[in-house]
Every structure is written in structure tokens, then in C-alpha cells.
Amino acid sequence: MDNALSVSFQHHNSMMDASAPLSDTTDPPLFSVPIEVLLQIASDLTTPEYGNLRLTCKYVEGQVLNAFSREFFTKRQFMLTEFSLQALVDISESRFSPSLRHVIISLERPFATPSNYTNFITFNDTTEKRQKSNCTLQESIDHSMLLSTGHGVEMIAQALSGLNNLETIGMRDFYSHSRRRDSIRQWRSYGVRTYFEDTDHRMEFPQTYVGATNGFRDQASYLNQTFLNILRALGKAGSQPTTFEVILRHSSLNDSAFYVPKWVESTVHPVLANLRTLFLDLNSTDTEVWVDDGTNEVACTNYRLTRFLSTLSRLEHLRLNFRISDREVTQQVLSWLSKPAPTTIPTPSTTLLPPAPVAIDFPNLRQLDIGMTSTTSKILVDIARKFHTTLRVISLHKIALTHDDSLGAPRQKVNLWAGFFRQLSKLNLNLTGINMSELNQQYSRNVTFRDSRNPRKRNWGGTNTQSGLKDFADSVEVEDFPEPEDSVHTDEEEDDNSDEEEEEEEEEEEEEGTPSESENNDDNA
């Protein structure tokens, strides 16, 4: 891409040389335009117009280069096709590679069963339509081969080895709507537009439910394989970004995704050991693993997840969103997180079963985000107590507090969230941030915050933690206490909530320099 621009640039210069030469002592008027004015002009241009501005002359190109790199090459999104990954390789070998700090591997793919479309081609169709049918089938085959042969891992590793300033690697199943330039508001993966032009079909994103068991297994396997392949590519490249963000809106990772085979442990573990930030969107409905807890043989859900988290010794920021959750399953994960690490080495299992996962301390944990599940205030308080010396920010999103039967007052009349904030205030926490959004409570409908611009959200930042927690406790209200027999809160109600506000929140977190499509505008439509 950069080479293509260089050719255009050289051609442009040759045209200038052929014209009447300027005086050696006279600079072109454009040279006197301040950089601030050039950048203001550039901010109002479409992407093709911006490219043309850069082709004006070397002086202008040099003046806007840093701003151009920040906008289009700080953060970029690619998909698992050879065409898209080759663009990533090309960028890693170009002068823009130092600018690229955030790479996203997107999960869209060619349809796994293109015969649904190709079978409709007849002798009466045009050659162009037959060619598009051939291309649809070939893209699906190429994608399958890219994964099954390991070539995709090799291409990602080749690219990552040239990205010396990479800080964040991501995995997504959506397009961000944070784009500001042009009429298009989405940052799409590189190659999406080309695929559509070649096939007349759109890429397929994985979905949590696809209406058939085989389809679900295929998509779950695809997500799990992609997650491990990204880790393998990082290890092969010797790349150790500090942040791994798995942000999924239409799918989620089940427990099998976190299984690291022994034959890749030496490759993957150095990557995990260097991570400071990890975001995960989880599906807690995978099969159980039977373990020996030292006393009994018990079924352990999210066994692989807890073992995976145990390898993240330098973790500072952990986000766990339970997009598909069973309350009992997520309780086990959060309970494991709340337990202090044992002071003695656990007794090895005396059975054929593996030992139960051992809790660890996460001695550097500064921020914890938990979302989209039901739990008790006791578990959340225990988690805060465990990390009280290092924890600085707590964020809870779409959490429903459930009642503890030991409460003396009638359960439907208790404001559990007020009690939760008061319990936190007794822990001598040293927080600098508290973020609460879309909270709920068993036997109620809405938890709101009085005097908040958005009653369903409240954020606090400062140094006086006790004052902040008191403010939360005094302002939180539980609306519409119904009779218990008329209102039974379930996890499914949480899952039915729209993701619109969550999308807005994530887009607010997007940097202004979000990833552009290629310089030749491959994916601008």
C-alpha cells in the first residue's frame, strides 16, 4: 500500500518537474501554510481527498504524515483471509509499522457452506455471475485451508515480528461505529469491501445461537481456535503486548478456549506472563471437568479458564463479562477469584482426577471489571477484600445482586446495593474510581442512582474513597419492589437486555485515531 503511494508520488513529482521551474529562491506558496492550517484542511476532507492532499508534494506529505499515521495506522482491524493478513504483513514492513500499536483480529469469515449460493447459478446466468460464484466457493476453501494448514498463524506471526511498538492485540465480532471521517461510520476489517465486490456476498460473523447443534459447535470451535492461534502467533513472533482484548457482542468464548496444549505451552506462556490487561467475554455453559478438591471428587465448571488465569502473574486489569451465564457456574468462577491463595503447597491428588484449581493472589491487580451475571454481595465484598491493598478501580456492569437467606428483613424490601456499598466502606479500600451501570436486584426491576444524569449509571473518581462509597450508598434506589410470587429475576432477563448502551460505552472508549481502511480505500464502503 505504501509502495503504491510512493509510485503515485514519484509520478506526481515527475509531472511537476516537466512544468516551468520555479526560481531557486522562491518557495511555492503552499510552503508558507502553517501546519495547523494544513491539519484543519485535512480534517474536513474525505479519505480519498486526504490521499490526494498527501500527493500534492513532498512538503505537504511530510507535514501531515504524523497526523495521517495517528488516524489511519495506530489501530487497525484485519480478518482471517490471506488478502487481509497480507495487508497486515505489508504494513509491518512499511514506514507505518512504528505507528501501529493496536491490532484487531476480526472473526468474520466467508460462508462455510457457499453451495447455498453457488447452486443457484444456471446456464442462463452471465459469465460475471458465474465468476462471482467461483470466487465465493474459492474464498471459503481458502479460508478453511488458511486455518487448517497453520498458514494463518504464520502470516500473523510474520506481521507481528515487525510491529515493535505493538501494545494491544484484540479479537472482535463486530465493527466499531466510531469512525468520524466520510459518511461511513464503521471501521471495517481490511478486505471486507473487496470480498463483497468479488462475490456479491457479505462476510459471516459467528453467532452464539445458529439454530443447529452442529453449527453451534463449528462456531464455538472457530472462536476457540482463533483465540489460541492469536496467542501462538504472538509467541512465534516473540511479541509480548501488554493488553489482550476479547470484545464480543454476538458470540463468546467457552471454557475449552482456554485449554493450552502442552506442545504450545513453551510458546504461549511467555506471552501470558507479560500481559497486564485482559478482557474476556465468556460463555459459562461448557461441559464440566471432574476434579479432586482434596476432600471430594467434584464437578468443576470453567476449570480451564481458572487454570488459564493462574498463569497471568503480572495482571493489572481484568475484565470478565459473562455473556451467556448460568448463575451457579459464574458463582464458582467468582468464588475462586475471591479466595486467598493457599499459604502451603496443596496436597497432590491421590486419584486419577486432576486437582481442583488453586486460587492465586494477582499481586498487581489494580482494576477489576465484572459484568452480565448474578451473584451475592458477599462474593463481591470478598473479592474486594482480597485485593484491597492494590485495587484502585471497580466496575460492575449488568450485575444482579441476589438475596442471602440469612437476611433478617423481608427479602423483597431490602436494598442490597446500599448494603453492598456500606460493606465496601468498611474494607479500608484506596479506590480512585467506581463505575456502576445497568445494575439489578433479585425481586426487583430497576436499580437507579438519584441525581445522576443517567439514573442507570453512576461513576465516581477521586481520592476520598469513603466519601465516594457513602455517596453511592445514599443515592442508590431499588425501584418497584413487587411481591415475590409475581417477580422472579433470572439470568435470562439480563441476557435479553439490549447491547445498544454497551456499544455506546465501548465506542466512547475508542481512541480518536481508530483504524482506517487501507490507503487505497479498499474498505471504505
Image (cartoon, helix red, strand yellow):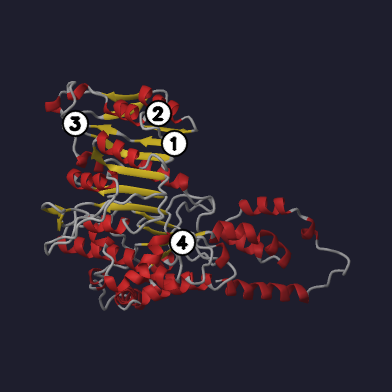
Determine which quarter of the picture holds residue 26. bottom right
Which label belongs to residue 109?
none
* Position above or below: 252 against 19: above
Q: Are marks 2 and 1 in contact (CB under 8 Å)?
A: yes
Mark 4 or mark 1: name the one nearer the start of the chain: 4
Q: Secondary structure at mark 1?
A: loop
Q: Secondary structure at mark 2?
A: helix
In the rendered structure, the answer to whether residue 74 lies left or right of residue 214 reads right
Mark 4 or mark 3: name the one nearer the start of the chain: 4
Q: Amino acid at mark 1?
A: Leu
Determine which quarter of the picture holds residue 153. bottom left
Q: Where does label 2 land, which residue?
A: 469
- Badge 3 crowding class, 10 Å Cα cut-off, few under 14, some 14 to 19, many 20 or more, is few
Q: Are marks 2 and 3 in contact (CB under 8 Å)?
A: no
Q: Where does label 4 land, which residue?
A: 241
Residue 63 drawn at (x, y percent): 70, 60
Mark 2 or mark 4: name the one nearer the start of the chain: 4
- Residue 261 shows in this picture: yes
Q: Where does label 1 land, which residue?
A: 431
Nearer to us of marks 4 and 1 is 1
Determine which quarter of the picture holds residue 406. top left
Relative to the observer, which residue lies in front, 165 or 131? 165
